[in-house]
Image (cartoon, helix red, strand yellow):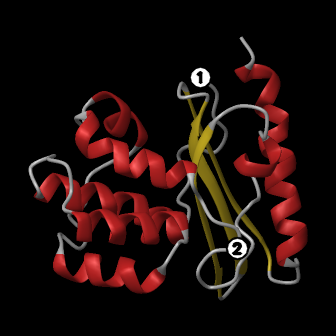
């Protein structure tokens, strides 16, 4: 396990959608989601759809959401985690808002199976881009970054893609 800046605070942007999905499954007793919820979760995660996330956030636990990848692969029953992992592996490009979300893990680690959730936003002082996910169903990769406001989204996406590519040798063992 390797980390850099793990004690720093970062904006999560759309990564919170994964937590919202886990909260919805937890609220449902970790059972397979209904067809309607499954469709909503898939749209929220694969297309990074903000409207679906807002609706689930409002109807669910709001800030009392549960935690992520290790729980998803080790504690959540497969009938509940399967739809989320499938949606992470089916990330659409572009996202529902038109943002190109194939950066970081999807473009930097294209050789193996991945299940990724991306995040992007602008804050007053920075452009925030995040990439997180499971690689080869075994490794958790998380890259969280803030760039100066003058940085283009394309350049920021390229930097996260380069960062993901840089960890590839460590994932080969």
| Residue furthest left in the image | 29
| Residue 151, x across and y down, in percent | 88, 77
Which residue is identified by label 1? 1
Is residue 12 visible in the rendered image? The answer is no
Single out the mark in the foreground, 1 or 2.
2
Residue for badge 2:
94
Mark 2 Cα within 10 Å, few/some/many (few <14, many 20+)?
some
Write the residue at 23% across / 73% down. 62
- Residue 119 image offset from top left, x and y in percent: 60, 67
User: Considering the image in quadrants, where does the C terminus appear?
Assistant: top right
Report which quarter residue 36 is drawn in: bottom left
User: Does residue 132 sit above or below 79 in this rendering?
Assistant: below
Image coordinates of residue 139 in percent, x first then y, are 57, 28
Q: Are marks 1 and 2 in contact (CB under 8 Å)?
A: no
Q: First in sequence: mark 1 or mark 2?
A: 1
Residue 63 placement (x, y as % from top left): 25, 70
The answer to which of 87 and 151 lies nearer the viewer is 87
Residue positioned 26% across, 52% down in the render: 66
């Amino acid at each position: 396990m390797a980390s850099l800046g793990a004690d720093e605070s970062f904006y999560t942007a759309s990564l919170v959608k994964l937590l919202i999905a886990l909260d919805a499954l937890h609220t449902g007793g970790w059972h397979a989601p209904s067809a309607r919820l499954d469709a909503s979760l898939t749209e929220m995660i694969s297309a990074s759809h903000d409207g679906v996330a807002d609706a689930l956030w409002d109807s669910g636990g709001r800030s009392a959401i549960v935690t992520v990848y290790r729980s998803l692969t080790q504690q959540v029953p497969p009938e509940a985690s399967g739809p989320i992992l499938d949606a992470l592996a089916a990330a659409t490009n572009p996202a529902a808002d038109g943002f190109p979300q194939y950066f970081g893990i999807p473009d930097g680690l294209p050789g193996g199976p991945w299940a990724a959730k991306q995040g992007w936003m602008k804050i007053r002082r920075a452009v925030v881009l995040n990439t997180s996910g499971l690689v080869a169903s075994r490794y958790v990769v998380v890259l969280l970054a803030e760039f100066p406001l003058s940085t283009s989204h394309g350049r920021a996406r390229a930097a996260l893609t380069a960062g993901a590519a840089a960890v590839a040798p460590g994932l080969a063992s």
